[in-house]
Image: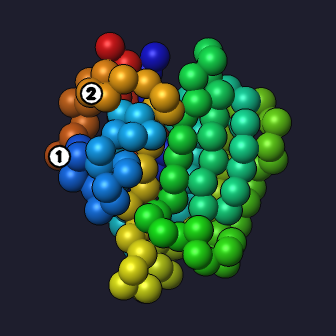
Amino acid sequence: MQVLSPCAGRVMAITDVNDPTFAGQLVGPGVGIEPPDGLQSIVAPADGRLLNVDPHAFILLVDGVGILVHIGINTVRLEGRLFEVLAERGEQVTAGTPIVSWDPASVTDPDMDRTILVVLMDQAPDSIVSPAIGTDVVAGDVLFTQE
């Protein structure tokens, strides 16, 4: 499975993100993306069906595997403020379809982090390969593949 970047930003290893659950790959393997300031859409990282859509996160079902895109860390506390949901649960989407819009610069709470997490849910730790780690990507660039 190939997963594309849902946004622009600098890619980091999941083990380097500022959240022990994600860094420990308890949700699954993946990467973090540090997005630039400015209004942007977070897009579908593959073709699939939206299993769930919340303002701060969505799950895309692709070939029986859930891809979680979590927009920021601890941003659930915003209760949807600062996010605009652009797609609906159950919708079939193609890679690049806008799902949520936000401006990372609007996250100013020191207990929150604007890192976007892209995770293959319930998959073995370290089961992805990402040549994008340490590089800058734009939406649609290859982010990682599953081994």
Q: Position of residue 62 (x, y in %)?
A: 61, 22
Residue at 38 percent across and 70 percent down: it is: 113
Query: Which image quadrant for residue 2?
Result: top left
Q: Residue type at mark 2?
A: Asp
Earlier in the chain: of badge 2 and badge 1, it is 2
Residue placed most toward the observer, 43 or 107:
107
Which is closer to the viewer, label 2 or label 1? 2
Q: As drawn, is 117 to the left or to the right of 25?
A: right
Q: As displayed, is residue 17 above or below residue 141?
A: below
Which residue is denoted by mark 1 in the rendering?
134
Q: Residue at x 34, y 59 (%)?
A: 19
In the image, 103 versus 80, the foreground residue is 80
Q: Quadrant of the C terminus?
A: top left
Q: Which residue appears at 70% of the width and 57% of the height?
A: 54
Q: Is residue 95 above or below residue 26?
A: above
Q: Are marks 2 and 1 in contact (CB under 8 Å)?
A: no
The residue that appears at 25% across and 37% down in the rendered structure is 132
When asked about the image quadrant of residue 89, the answer is top right
- Give the secondary structure at mark 1: loop
Measured from the top left, where is residue 136 in percent x and y? 26, 49
Whether residue 105 appears in this view of the structure is: no
Q: Which residue is mark 2?
A: 126
Q: Is residue 76 visible?
A: yes
Disc 2 and disc 1: Cα gap in Å? 17 Å
Identity, as a three-letter code, of the amino acid under mark 1: Gly
Tag 1: Cα neighbours inside 10 Å, few (<14), some, or many (≥20)? few
Q: Residue 115: give x, y in percent of width and height.
A: 38, 61
Q: Nearer the viewer, residue 141 or 88?
A: 88
Image-quadrant location for residue 56:
bottom right
**Which percent across, then down, holds residue 105?**
44, 79
